[in-house]
Amino acid sequence: MLPVACLPVASILMGIGYWIDPTGWGANNVIAAFLLKAGGSVIDNMAILFAIGVGVGMSDDNDGTAGLAGLVSWLVITTLLAPGSVAFLKGIDVSEVAAAFGKIQSQFTGILAGLIGATCYNRFKGTKLPTALSFFSGKRSVAIVTSGCSLVAALILFFVWPFIYGALVDFGTAILSTGAVGAGIYTFLNRLLIPFGLHHALNSVFWFDVANINDLSNFWSGVGNYGETGMYMVGFFPFMMFGLPAGALAMYHTAKTTRKKVVAGLMMAGALSSFFTGITEPLEFAFMFLAPGLYLIHAILAGISAVVTNLIPVRAGFNFSAGFVDWFLSFKAPMAQNPLLILPIGAVFGGIYYAVFRFAITKFNLKTPGREDDDVESEMKVVLANDNFTEVAAIILEGLGGKENIQSLDNCITRIRAEVKNYTAVDEKKIKTAGISGIMRPSKTSVQVIVGTKVQFVADEMKKMIKS
């Protein structure tokens, strides 16, 4: 999520630029052109942002050396597999080179390069060399090792990348050919993959230039097809801005009276986050595992939202996520079409979400927040809602088995990610008393605590406690 966090600035710059000059796209106003070019500089280099951001984010201690290693890997791979280089290596004319190599500078390669850089950093940052070579010991050895590993990766990709690229293009083309229904299928699958964090892989096919769709960049640059570009983003606005907040209201209304205060804090924070920024994890994780059937209903409604908005038609886009800020800024984007219709459509979906959620919760007695049978839940505190990050951190750390049980600790945009030594020492009930949204256990030693958009402050406090 580190590189994705860079994208809102592109939304702001380009959104204001299109508001200033909605018809000339910068040709009629020098200030608009200035802003559009500045925002475009971020959009056009997303692959490099991924290489550096993933390198830093996947390193053990978020060190910048890992980001540099990711960039080194990106430069090695993309240079060796550029169409001109491939033509030279094969002894053929550049026009005969497979089209896949023309797309080697993609977000897919950026993510791969970042992973290579981070892996090399984690493995070799403590390397000790003989005295004569001691200058290259430790972190200075990482870039060198990364270069060697990237050579091997480039050699493998030289043979397999055309097949990988071809499969991605075929998948994207198959979905694209089904129009509004395909957009609905994609949005449905996007929500289903959220619990596993694999939705980003799916997004790269439709939002970025991995499979020739490039919905996000084409929407903002104006090089797409009007009435088509934006179809894989617009369906997210109704359920993120209106649907999920309405679902949160339904969960609040159906909570036990004694727990409404705690649930109100959780639901309000999640609803505001979803509406304004399009960050839905705090809400989704609040009921995802407590009521998986309800989450499936949510995924289905999300897919229907995409079908409806595409058929009307409406087109709106985002650089970060489908919240109010991105929706408002996209009004004057070249590919925007009837963006104001998001409001009545969203209002209808809000009503549907509320009615369906309330009916399902009461009819099937779903254990959404505030309706759990566990008596410990009644002890839940509202410290997170009160921004008491030190106390939240202390509760979570105690629930994870104390600092002695922590092997590594990091965070993404909404989750604390911890590796623990003894998984039996983790007390989920204790962690939940901090007022967090949910907990995931991907493996025996991995624990993910869903905190929400304030996670950075909690994680920082936890790191201080671990070091003290």
Image (cartoon, rainbow, N blue to C red):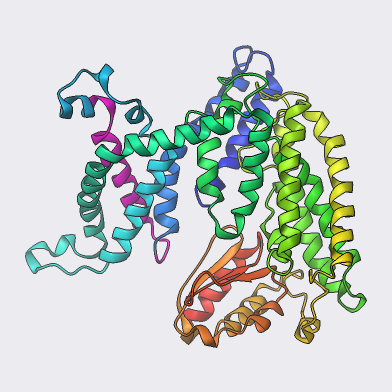
Residue occupying the point 44% across, 82% down: 421
> Would residue 100 appear left or right of 418 to someone viewing this image?
left
Residue 62 is a magenta residue: yes
Residue 290 higher or lower than 15, as above or below: below
Where is residue 117? Give x, y as percent. Answer: 32, 53
Where is residue 176? Give x, y as percent. Answer: 58, 29
Tag count: 0
Residue 22 higher or lower than 190, as above or below: above
Please say whether residue 210 is visible from this viewpoint: no
> Would residue 156 appear left or right of 463 to someone viewing this image?
left
Residue 45 is a magenta residue: no
> Would residue 120 appear left or right of 379 to someone viewing this image?
left
Magenta span main SS: helix
Q: Specify the farthest residue to the left.
A: 132
Residue occupying the point 25% across, 52% down: 146
Please say whether residue 101 is visible from this viewpoint: yes
Where is residue 199? Give x, y as percent. Answer: 56, 50
Where is residue 230? Give x, y as percent. Answer: 64, 29
Residue occupying the point 45% across, 37% down: 168
> Would residue 193 appear left or right of 87 to someone viewing this image?
right
> Which range is magenta?
60-84
